[in-house]
Image (cartoon, rainbow, N blue to C red):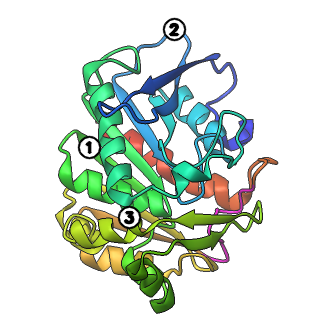
Amino acid sequence: MGEDAMSVESGARAITVTTFEIRPADGGPPVRGDVRVAEGTRPKTAVVIVHGFKGFRRFGAWGALARALALRGHAAVTFDFSHNGIDENGEFSRLDLFRLNTHSREVDELRAVLDALASGAIGGRKSPRVGLLGHSRGGAGAIIAAAEDTRVRALVTWASIASIGDRWTEEEKAAWRRGDDVLSLNSRTRQQMPLAPEYWVDLQVNRDRLDVAAAAARVTVPWLIVHGDADTTVPVDDAHALFDAAGENAELMIMEGVDHGMGARHPYPGPTDALRAAAEAAFEWFGEHLEG
């Protein structure tokens, strides 16, 4: 995002970017991520950006948003879920991993990132005050993590889904029950991306944990819900459902004429007015509720 809205005033410091890996105990593929810190600082707060379905840490505006958060004094974390299907070149070449991804795996991996921040393994020092910024499906994971983990002190969701199982057709659910894969089109790359029956099994076995509305009702930290009313991927009704389920610490920000990505694209061409507005709202939210 541009220097006008996405960085602090003139004279901004350089950014140090440190890449990390978190390897699971079962020997599976690692969670890989980047931590951005303003040069010469040791932040006491951290913000973790949680990407959505068919997203990745270097998608679109995430790097620019993380830089801007770092310039505002936070350790800014972007990361790839281990089974998001992306390779080191930013291509969806690991569809074998994508096929086996589940929502429970993603929440567990997000909490592993929180563990690493709390221990000081990433970010350069222990971070007792952490905020989450989740987009789309990543919003649902961030909501569940905020409901489960007291280390999360502030939450921002952009275009978050309000439920998981309801997003699939009866035909897709029947395919999983038969033991077949379901294909999901990536509208950007035009790839048909497979999801194995394990995905549906996870939703059934962990039904209570993955109930996003129920998790929303358990979130007690300050929560900013941002959604565009022109979102054709996740309808704005989801934002209203989350706000209705949430407690008194939630605020709702509906952006008129704004789509699912807040106007951002990949490759990232620069900020839109909508993206600037959503980002500034997030900056103010984390500034008030993490630094206070």
Residue to which mark 1 is pinned: 153
| Disc 3 residue crowd, few under 14, some 14–19, many 20+, Cα 10 Å | some
- Viewed as shown, does residue 187 lie left or right of 202? right
Disc 2 marks which amino acid? Gly
Decide which of 287, 38 is in the foreground and name it.
Answer: 38
Residues under labels 3 and 2: Cα distance? 46 Å
Seen from this angle, which residue lies furthest bottom? Answer: 170
Residue to which mark 3 is pinned: 198
One can see residue 291 in this view: no
The boundaries of the magenta stretch are: 256-265
Disc 3 marks which amino acid? Glu
Query: Split into 4 quadrants, where in the image is the N terminus?
Result: top right
Q: Is 269 above or below relative to 165?
A: above
Decide which of 186, 250 is in the foreground and name it.
Answer: 186
Label at residue 279: none
The mark nearer the N terminus, 3 or 2, is: 2
Q: Is residue 262 magenta?
A: yes
